[in-house]
Image (spheres, rainbow, N blue to C red):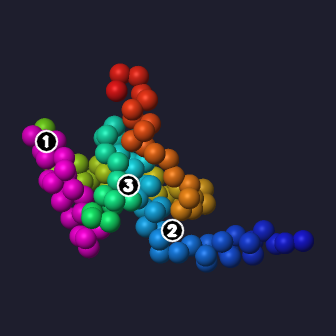
C-alpha cells in the first residue's frame, strides 16, 4: 500500500519551474476575474509581462501599456495594489488546494458568458 504523504511529497517535488509560472499566471487571471477586470494573460501575453523583474513594475507596465484607459479613472498604484492583493489570495487558495499546471480556467471566456457582459 502506498503512503499518501510520500506520494504528495513526490508530487510537490515534481513541480517544475514551468508549473510554478503557470500557477502564478492562473492566479493573476483568477484575480482579474475576481476584480471584474476583463483581462486575460495567456501563454503569449504572460511571457512579455515577465520581462520586468519586480511584480509591481510588471503590473504597472501592463496597465500603462495595455489598459491605459483605466488610468483616467484610477490611480495606477491603486490598480496594482488591488491586483496584487487579489492575486496573493488566489495563489494561496490554488496552492493550498494542490493546483498544478494543467488545472486552468479560461477566465476571459467566463467573462463572455456573464449576463450583461
Residue at 25% from the left image edge and 70% from the top image edge: 51
| Main secondary structure along the magenta-highlighted residues | helix
**Rendered residue at 31%/41% (across/down):** 37
Screen quadrant of the N terminus? bottom right
Q: Which mark is residue 19?
A: 2
Kindly report which numbered mark, 1 or 3, lies closer to the viewer in this rendering.
3
x, y percent for residue 54: 26, 70
**What is the crowding at mark 2: few (fewer than 14 residues within 10 Å), some, or many (at least 20)?**
some
The mark found on residue 69 in the picture is 1
Residue 99: x, y in percent?
A: 57, 59
Q: Residue 36 sits in which quadrant?
A: top left
74 vs 61: above or below: above
Tag 3 residue: 42
Q: Residue at point 82% right, 72% down?
A: 3
Q: CA distance from mark 3 to mark 2?
A: 14 Å
Looking at the rendering, the stretch of residues picked out in magenta corresponds to 50-72
User: Which one is earlier in the sequence, the residue at label 1 or at label 3?
Assistant: 3
Cα distance in 3D space between marks 1 and 3:
21 Å
Question: Camera-side residue: 57 or 50?
Answer: 50
> Residue 116: which quarter of the image?
top left
Q: Are the residues at dot 1 and dot 3 in contact (C-beta closer than 8 Å)?
A: no
Amino acid at each position: 500500500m502506498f503512503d499518501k504523504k510520500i506520494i504528495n511529497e513526490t508530487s510537490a517535488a515534481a513541480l517544475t519551474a514551468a508549473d510554478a509560472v503557470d500557477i502564478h499566471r492562473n492566479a493573476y487571471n483568477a484575480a482579474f476575474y475576481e476584480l471584474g477586470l476583463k483581462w486575460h494573460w495567456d501563454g503569449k501575453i504572460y511571457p512579455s509581462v515577465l520581462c520586468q523583474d519586480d511584480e509591481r513594475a510588471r503590473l504597472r507596465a501592463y496597465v500603462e501599456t495595455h489598459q491605459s484607459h483605466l488610468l483616467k479613472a484610477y490611480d495606477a498604484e491603486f490598480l496594482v495594489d488591488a491586483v496584487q492583493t487579489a492575486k496573493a489570495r488566489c495563489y494561496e487558495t490554488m496552492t493550498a488546494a494542490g493546483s498544478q499546471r494543467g488545472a486552468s480556467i479560461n477566465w476571459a471566456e467566463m467573462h463572455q458568458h456573464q449576463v450583461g457582459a
